[in-house]
Image (cartoon, rainbow, N blue to C red):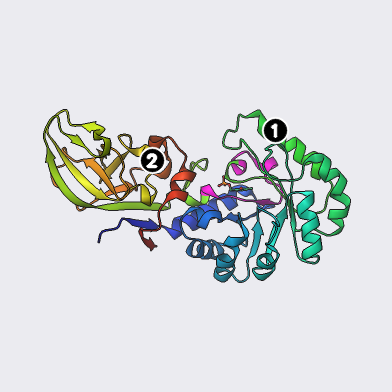
Amino acid sequence: MGTAHLTVDLAALADNWRALDALSGADCATGAVVKADAYGLGIAPVARALWEAGARRFFIAVAEEGAALRAALPEAEILLFSGHMAGDADAIAAADMVPLLNSIEQLTRHFETLGDHPFGIQLDTGMNRLGLEPAEWAAARDLVLAQRPRLVMSHLACADDPEDAMNGRQLAVFHEMTDGIEVPRSLAATGGIGLGPEYHFDLTRPGIGLYGGLPFAEARPVVALSAPVVQVREVAAGETVGYGASWIADEDARIATVSAGYADGLIRAMGNEAVLFHGATPCPLVGRVSMDLLTVDVSHLPDIPDRLDILGPEQGIDDLATAAGTIGYEILTSLGGRYHRDYR
Ligand SMILES: *Cc1c(COP(=O)(O)O)cnc(C)c1O
């Protein structure tokens, strides 16, 4: 088989949800963020496994993601981070989504086009990305609360760093904006769960931690990725490998050409930086990443393996991300559509 194999461990995913649910505490429900095709892993199988584990509230980014999720989970509550955007009324109604309204313009649009349809509210407590600002909320609050929103939420900008003073500032603003209301509240994603119970409110919204990524350090790994070796060649000292001749053999070397490349989400920044693995033995990725191929130094291996591991027990998404100068979120959501996918 010519393509790389991506294995998604649905049991590990479910364990991660249960662990984050336990950390969220007995008085707090735990949702699941499945935007961007469940961080690249496939929204239908991932959402079904999370439902089986006990998740009932699912968050997506844009209305276009709702139909596939509704088809997979007829009974789930589906909440929409982008709120109610122009032209989305039919999609919101058809997939029965709960838009998290984030501006006066969206409030107006929602009440005009889908008056009786459930909604939630997104507040800006300092991230300056989405949500009503304190003054807007103060003006709209009584009117909005009379319409009984399902949820009032905000998002933390620096929750991956517990020491960051921004966390406490946003928490204080969230309290100022919402204390005394009778609507369920949500502030914490994966990072916020780790900040402690005062950040949890009524519902947490983990994403990356479910999929095995930091800042949930105790997460079980969920993805494994291996790619077949297409060809092996001997390269003499002084010869170069790949586009731009960016790697030069300083002694005779054996180079394996592996079937996966930047079209599969293995970004060019990995070139001459990342390693692949044969069992526990690291094998450096040498030369640039091509669209469909990687070149790997296997000179030190006694035998030439059929496949090399890109993600697995020796290298998780955050390890690979570090080698490529990015974060686990970007590694996952870049994973390509060309992989042969196995769900376990
Ligand atoms: C993506 C997102 C989440 C999930 O964040 P993780 O860091 O992946 O846990 C939660 N809330 C909002 C508003 C988001 O955009």
Q: For the magenta stretch, what is the residue range? A: 192-209
The N terminus appears in which quarter of the rendering?
A: bottom left
Secondary structure under the numbered disc 1 in the rendered image: helix
142 or 277, which is in the foreground? 142
Magenta stretch: includes residue 96: no
Say whether disc 2 or disc 1 marks the residue closer to the N-terminus: 1
Residue lying at 48% horizontally and 56% vertically, measured from the top left: 13
Question: In the figure, is residue 122 to the left or right of 292?
Answer: right
Amino acid type, callout 1: Gly
273 or 219, which is in the foreground? 273
Question: In the figure, is residue 43 to the left or right of 204?
Answer: left
Secondary structure under the numbered disc 2 in the rendered image: helix
Residue lying at 67% horizontally and 31% vertically, measured from the top left: 166
210 or 337, which is in the foreground? 337
Question: In the figure, is residue 268 to the left or right of 198?
Answer: left
Q: Nearer the viewer, mark 2 or mark 1?
A: 2
Give how far across and how far down residue 256 sits, in percent: 19, 45
Asked if residue 70 can be seen in this view, the reply is yes
Residue lying at 59% horizontally and 68% vertically, measured from the top left: 70
Amino acid type, callout 2: Leu
The C terminus appears in which quarter of the rendering?
A: bottom left
Q: Which mark is residue 320?
A: 2
Q: Dot 1: within a 10 Å radius of its alpha carbon, few (fewer than 14), some, or many (20 or more) residues?
A: some
Magenta stretch: includes residue 197: yes
Give how far across and how far down residue 287 sits, in percent: 26, 37
Question: In the figure, is residue 313 to the left or right of 191?
Answer: left
Q: Which mark is residue 168?
A: 1
Q: Which mark is residue 124?
A: none
27 or 152, which is in the foreground? 152
Q: CA distance from mark 2 to mark 1?
A: 31 Å
Asked if residue 179 can be seen in this view, the reply is no
